[in-house]
């Protein structure tokens, strides 16, 4: 529960900015192997500076999860990952009592143990199984908490996240309230398969990651597959962009562009002509109907 | 200008107000975030400023265009001809104020398009607007026009030359040309957008950002003609319909949930047995896998219900965001699947325009024909309706005195789990004139009068105990 009248700004002591400036973010992400554009660098910088969760939304395979991992590498933090799925509940996301161990403790209790002592004992730290959300709050080392694919979780989980992410504290009835001593850098990712609640969006900074511009995508391909000739990278990127412009069931992602370049390289193909495209189309398009359509529209037959 | 009135903060608040007028729901907490963001970043870096504001204020990708347009108006990149401030330019062009004739500009543009050099393309767009876009209107007042620029530069006529250069000696007509065309089209669009935004900036400079903001935001809703009349209503409806769709979705799920329990949940049972000293007195069961409701929406989008059609399509779109398995079909006198137009996150106006434009809904004369539509639906999409499906028909049942196709609907209703019909007409008009409502009423589980969001709420609430 959020008490009304709370100061909305987080206590300063909790937020320990890791980045000095937007340029610093860009440089350090670059060192971690992530080519950030202006929007990404700025938003990451702000999330770090303001201590707010960062909601990253965009189609599959544009590097949402990769971003959070790179932030972790850049800040020398550990990633705690909460993968969301339908049916995810509090016991999996927040904490749970280790009932097996509790049971053992009760059975092992000697006759002269009072009930009070046993009771206090089995609801102590030792019997608590911390799940990602609680672990992230309790950690004192730099942490990146990645809540992956929030849109897959049920609406109730959003409520839970709201509570945890607005105050960075968790109340365990038997133990009391655990408050973060050091705010984790929180990244939520979503494929926008459903609209997230306004309340959750309001509490986060928002970054929409889309397919990159041609230049940036080329740079990404060249940095990931350094052996690929620039000419070929250019052709691959252009072709992928032409594919994305069609109405496909599943547009090719950045990951697939990289895969394609790798494949072509492995096959020793150095110009992307019609024959090469037809024989390797399966790398970028994973639906038969998409392939048929692409062959048709690109006049490959 | 009025920016001086409140300084940076004043400007930001004006900007937020303009966003709200344009239909973005910006809360005060978000405004506070934006302000704190302003304080943390380098204000001289305009792109950074824009990203920062967007991160705090614009949380739906489909709003981003409106956001960018307004941002350019309220935080313009340069003032006047832009010659005084060359920061961030490479400066080789030596000022954008100098006179260059259109022919030369075309040549330069051609080169820039060929290289795909974004910065030069944008610089050329600004030069073009400065030189070609001005028209002196009333004395002492200038006006700026996009079409004047685009008519004189006419970038589309460059395509042939660009193609020739880009393809070199490669074979024409094939795959290489297709990809090259796509690339060129993309770059030309970039140029055109740059011209548009420069024109807006010039206009805003002359008349004040607020005045222009009111005009430039409109086109979004004007994309679809029939939406214009009820733009505010639509925004209002949207706000009520979305939560409703969410509730409808959970209701349909909940009804399944209360049915018998699933397998024994060992973990929970043992855990509960702690309360009784390790003796499992109560067994606990896993809930049955939540039933994934399958919903098939069949909606009339003909002229007679055009205002209702907005609403039904809006509901469809909202449902589409909540249910994983929704198939939407639209019909006038024949039926076509329109599910693909409603992928989540799409602009609703766009989706509606596309339904009307692209879907194959007219078979004979474009007047509602429920009978034929039902028959075609049953014949063409027999797999759509299964015993797990809830079928939702949206329409007024005004059939232009044609055959009702009652048997087809009856068969569909028999196959589906539930069949509901939402009718936008007042109940007392049902069955009058060409309304075939009476014929359909008994075939479906229930026909509901649904003229406004309130009645829809009622319907959704009532769905539970059925």
Image (cartoon, helix red, strand yellow):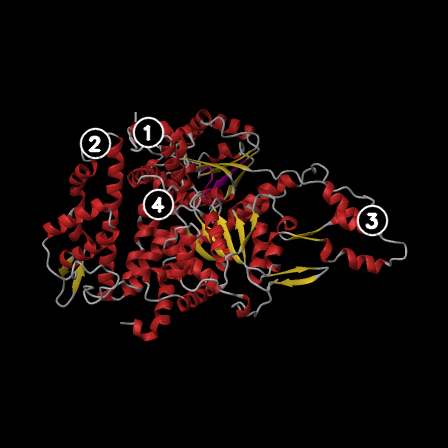
Tag 2 residue: B170
Image-quadrant location for residue B176: top left
Helix, strand or loop for disc 2:
loop
Q: CA distance from mark 3 to mark 2?
A: 82 Å
- Residue at image mark 3: B276
Q: Is residue B301 visible?
A: no
Asked whether B298 or B186 is in front, the reply is B186
The residue lying at 60 percent from left, 59 percent from top is A139
Callout 1: chain: A
Dot 4, how many residues are within 10 Å of its Cα: few (below 14), some (14-19), or many (20+)? many
Q: Is residue B320 left or right of residue A1?
A: left
Quarter of the image where the C terminus of chain B is located: top right
Q: Which mark is residue A276?
A: 1
Can you tell which of label 3 and label 1 is closer to the viewer?
1
Q: Residue at x 60, y 67 (%)?
A: A3
Task: Check chain identity for marks 3 and 1: say if they share one.
Answer: no
Please give the name of the residue rendered at 59% of the width and 41% of the height, measured from the top-left corner. B253
Left/right placement of residue B162 relative to residue A216 reads left
CB contact under 8 Å: marks 3 and 2? no
Q: Are marks 4 and 2 on the same chain?
A: no
- The part of the chain drawn in magenta is B419-432
Residue corresponding to mark 4: A217
* Residue B230 in view (yes/no): yes
| SS type, badge 4 | helix
Spatial CA span between label 4 and label 2:
25 Å
């Amino acid at each position: 529960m959020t008490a009304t009248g709370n100061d909305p700004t987080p206590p300063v002591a909790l937020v320990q900015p890791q980045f000095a400036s937007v340029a610093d973010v860009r440089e350090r992400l670059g060192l971690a192997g992530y080519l950030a554009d202006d929007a990404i660098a700025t938003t990451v910088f702000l999330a770090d500076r303001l201590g707010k969760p960062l909601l990253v939304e965009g189609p599959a395979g544009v590097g949402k999860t990769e971003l959070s991992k790179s932030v972790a590498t850049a800040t020398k933090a550990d990633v705690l990952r909460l993968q969301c799925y339908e049916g995810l509940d509090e016991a999996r996301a927040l904490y749970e009592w280790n009932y097996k161990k509790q049971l053992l403790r009760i059975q092992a209790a000697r006759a002269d143990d009072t009930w009070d002592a046993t009771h206090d004992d089995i609801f102590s730290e030792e019997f608590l199984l911390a799940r990602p959300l609680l672990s992230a709050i309790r950690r004192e080392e730099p942490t990146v908490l990645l809540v992956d694919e929030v849109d897959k979780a049920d609406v109730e989980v959003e409520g839970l996240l709201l509570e945890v992410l607005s105050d960075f504290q968790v109340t365990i009835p038997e133990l009391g309230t655990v408050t973060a001593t050091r705010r984790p850098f929180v990244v939520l990712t979503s494929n926008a398969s459903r609209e997230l609640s306004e309340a959750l969006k309001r509490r986060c900074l928002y970054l929409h990651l889309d397919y990159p511009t041609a230049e940036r995508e080329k740079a990404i391909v060249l940095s990931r597959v350094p052996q690929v000739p620039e000419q070929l990278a250019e052709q691959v990127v252009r072709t992928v962009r032409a594919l994305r412009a069609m109405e496909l069931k599943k547009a090719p992602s950045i990951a697939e562009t990289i895969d394609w370049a790798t494949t072509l390289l492995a096959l020793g193909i150095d110009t992307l002509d019609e024959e090469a495209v037809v024989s390797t189309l399966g790398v970028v398009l994973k639906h038969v109907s998409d392939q048929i359509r692409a062959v048709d529209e690109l006049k490959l037959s | 200008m009025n920016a001086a009135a409140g300084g940076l903060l004043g400007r930001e608040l004006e900007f937020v107000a303009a966003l709200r007028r344009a239909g973005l729901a910006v809360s005060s907490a978000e405004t506070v975030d934006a302000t704190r963001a302003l304080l943390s970043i380098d204000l001289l870096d305009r792109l950074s400023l824009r990203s920062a504001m967007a991160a705090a204020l614009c949380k739906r990708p489909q709003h981003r265009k409106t956001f960018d347009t307004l941002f350019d108006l309220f935080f313009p990149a340069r003032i006047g001809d832009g010659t005084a401030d060359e920061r961030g330019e490479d400066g080789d062009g030596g000022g954008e104020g100098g006179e260059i004739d259109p022919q030369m500009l075309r040549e330069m543009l051609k080169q820039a398009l060929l290289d795909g050099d974004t910065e030069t393309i944008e610089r050329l767009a600004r030069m073009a607007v400065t030189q070609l876009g001005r028209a002196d209107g009333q004395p002492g007042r200038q006006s700026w026009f996009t079409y004047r620029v685009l008519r004189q530069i006419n970038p589309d006529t460059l395509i042939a030359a660009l193609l020739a250069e880009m393809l070199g000696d490669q074979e024409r007509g094939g795959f290489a040309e297709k990809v090259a065309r796509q690339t060129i089209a993309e770059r030309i669009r970039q140029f055109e957008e740059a011209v548009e935004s420069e024109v807006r900036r010039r206009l805003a400079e002359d008349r004040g950002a607020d005045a222009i903001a009111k005009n430039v935001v409109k086109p979004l809703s004007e994309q679809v003609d029939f939406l214009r009349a009820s733009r505010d209503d639509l925004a209002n409806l949207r706000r009520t319909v979305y939560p409703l769709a969410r509730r409808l979705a959970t209701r349909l799920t909940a009804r399944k949930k209360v049915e018998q329990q699933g397998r024994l949940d060992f973990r929970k049972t043992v855990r509960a047995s702690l309360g009784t000293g390790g003796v499992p007195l109560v067994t606990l069961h896993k809930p049955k896998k939540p039933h994934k409701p399958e919903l098939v929406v069949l909606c009339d989008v003909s002229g007679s219900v055009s205002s209702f059609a907005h609403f039904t399509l809006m509901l469809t779109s909202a449902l589409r965001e909540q249910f994983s398995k929704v198939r939407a079909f639209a019909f006038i006198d024949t039926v076509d699947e329109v599910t693909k137009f409603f992928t989540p996150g799409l602009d609703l106006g766009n989706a509606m325009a596309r339904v009307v434009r692209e879907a194959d809904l007219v078979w004979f004369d474009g007047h509602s024909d429920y009978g034929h539509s039902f028959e075609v639906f049953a014949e063409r999409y027999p797999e759509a309706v299964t015993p797990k499906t809830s079928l939702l028909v949206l329409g007024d049942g005004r059939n232009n005195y044609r055959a009702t196709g009652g048997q087809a609907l009856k068969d569909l209703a028999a196959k589906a789990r539930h069949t509901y019909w939402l009718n936008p007409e007042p109940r007392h008009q049902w069955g009058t004139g060409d309304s075939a409502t009476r014929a359909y009423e008994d075939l479906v589980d229930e026909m509901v009068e649904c003229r406004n969001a309130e009645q829809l709420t009622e319907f959704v609430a009532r769905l539970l105990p059925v």
